[in-house]
Amino acid sequence: MKTTPTTKILAIGTINPGFEQSQVFAVLPDEVRETADLYLDGKIEQWYSLQGEKRGVAFIINATDPAVAHDMLEKLPLGKAHMMSFELIPIGPLNPLRFLQGMQPKP
């Protein structure tokens, strides 16, 4: 089966152990401001809060290389302070759509 290209990076960020909530809250205004700048620059396409027991954020990043996304996220205030880590997952178009009736493989 033909693979689909990586078109985005899913970044799931959580606060690293050992940091008090007050330490994170002290950095949060700058973190939010710089994250909004990345959104307005088109580098972050979507942003969400994680729900349930796991607290953190999920970003859809307009990049195809996890290293590029990692570098960008490490430059944010929580990254610089080593307070937040991200799991980076390359994602792309839904490949099983190729099995839709009538779809022909491209030469």
Image (spheres, rainbow, N blue to C red):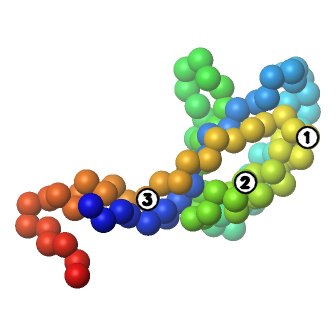
Query: Which one is in front in this view, the residue at disc 1 or the one at disc 2?
Result: 2
Type of amino acid under label 3: Gly
Which residue position is annotated with label 3?
92
Report helix, strand or loop for mark 2: helix
Q: Which disc number belongs to residue 55?
A: none
Q: Position of residue 40 (x, y in %)?
A: 68, 64
| Residue 77, image x, y percentages | 87, 46
Chain-order first, disc 3 or disc 2: 2
Mark 1 residue element: loop
Q: Secondary structure at mark 3?
A: loop
In the rendered structure, the answer to whether residue 91 lies left or right of residue 57 reads left
Q: Is residue 46 visible?
A: no
Residue at 8 percent of width and 67 percent of height: 102
Q: What residue does disc 2 label?
A: 70
1 or 3: mark nearer the eye: 3
Q: Residue furthest left?
A: 102
